[in-house]
Image: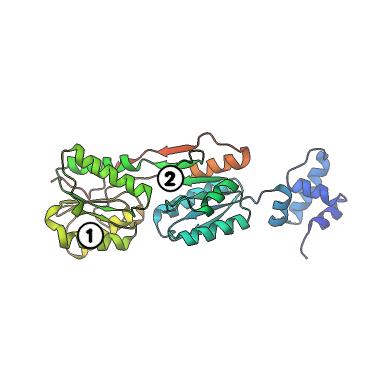
Amino acid sequence: MKITIKEIAKQCNVSVTTVSRVINNKVENIGKKTVCKVQDKIKELNFKPNSIARSMITGKSNTIGLVIPDVRNPFFSELAKGVEDFMNDQNYGVLLCNTDGSLIKEEQYINLLQGKSVDGVIFTTQNNIESEKYFLDAIEKTPVVLVERYLKGKSNIPGVYVQNEIGAELMCNFILERGYSKIACITGPMHTTNSKLRLKGYKKALRNAGLKVDNKIIVEGNYHYESGYDLMKKLYDDQREKFDAVFACNDIMAYGAYKFLKDNNISVPDDLALAGFDNMTFFDVFEPKLTTINLPAQEMGKKASKMLFDIITNHECESNSYEFKVELVDNGSVGCK
C-alpha cells in the first residue's frame, strides 16, 4: 500500500496540514511533541514526499539545471561532478542538459527546465550569441550562474571564469623560453569568447618576444578530438617548415594532434613540441604526458553551485564574478631546443 500524507495524519491523530508543515520544515506554532511524533511516523513508514506536491507548497523544486555543450569532454564531466557533489550535499538534484553546442537544443532545454520549475540554472556552453530572446528571457525569470559564458552589458549576472588570456600567454612564454621560436596554434571555435581570449594570449606572447604572428600556422578547431587530429595533419602537410611547436587551445584537440604525430612516427618533444590547455588527466595514456594549463574544473563547478545556492536561498551572493587563477603543468611534451 502506498503511504500518503493522509495516512500519516490519521495514524498520528493530527491534521493533514500539520503533517505537511512538518515535512516542509515549517514547524512554528506546532508543539515539539507533535513534531517528533510525526517525524517518527514518517521514518517508521519510510514515507517519501511527492516532489511535485511539495514544490507547490514550498515554491521550490530543490532541483537545478546544468546546461553544458559536450558531456564527452572531460572538462565538462569534471565540472558536472563538482556541481552535483555540492548540490547533493544541499539535498538538491541536478538535471543535466547536453546541447552538443546547438542553439536549437539550448533553447529546447531552457524551455524544458522552466517547465520543470527548477530553482536555478548553471550555464556553460560554447555559444556567445547572447541576444537570443529565449536566453535573455531565461535569465530574467530564473536565477542563473554562468561558467565561462560571457555576457556583454550584463555584469549583474553572476559568473565563474578562468584566466584564458593569461593562461595562453603563460604557456607560449614557457615554450619560447625552452628555445622554440615558431609556434603553430590550433584555436577553439572562434564564435566563443574563451577561444578569442586564448588566441589573444598566444599572439601577445609572440609579439612581446619580438616575433611576427604568422596567420598561416593558426588554424581554427572546434575543441573536439577529431579536429585536433585533422588540423595537425593539415599543418604538417602544408606548413611543416614554418613551426617547431604547437599550442592547442584545449587538451582534447592537443591529444588529437598527439595521435596524428604518433601515427606518423613523429616524436614529441624530440621532433616537435606540443602543449594544451585544461589539464585533463583522462588522456594520460601518452608518454610523455601533455604539458598544459590547469583548470580546476570540479572547483569551478562547486563555486558556481555555491553562488547559485546563495542566490536561491538568500537572493544574493558574495560576488557577481569569480575568476580562477591558472597554472602551468610541465609534463614533458615541451622539451628544450
| Residue at (56, 47) in percent of width and height | 87
Report the side of 200 relative to 27 (left or right): left
Taking the image as drawn, is residue 293 in sight? no
Q: Amino acid at mark 1?
A: Met
Taking the image as drawn, is residue 129 in sight? yes
Q: Nearer the viewer, residue 294 or 213?
A: 213
- The location of residue 179, given as percent across then percent down, is 14, 43
| Residue at (26, 63) in percent of width and height | 230
The numbered mark at residue 150 is: 2
Q: Nearer the viewer, residue 291 or 180?
A: 180
| Residue at (14, 57) in percent of width and height | 240
Q: In the figure, 321 relative to 187: above or below?
A: above
Q: Residue furthest top?
A: 318
- Type of colouring: rainbow
- Label 2: few (<14), some (14–19) or many (≥20) C-alpha neighbours in 10 Å: many
Mark 2 or 1, closer to the camera: 2
The numbered mark at residue 232 is: 1
- The location of residue 251, given as percent across then percent down, is 32, 53
Q: Amino acid at mark 2?
A: Tyr
Cα gap from disc 2 to disc 1, whole angstroms: 29 Å
Report the side of 151 relative to 34 (left or right): left
Q: Secondary structure at mark 2?
A: loop
- The location of residue 319, given as percent across then percent down, is 50, 34
Q: Secondary structure at mark 1?
A: helix
Report the side of 198 relative to 36 (left or right): left
The numbered mark at residue 17 is: none
Q: In the figure, 150 relative to 266: above or below?
A: above
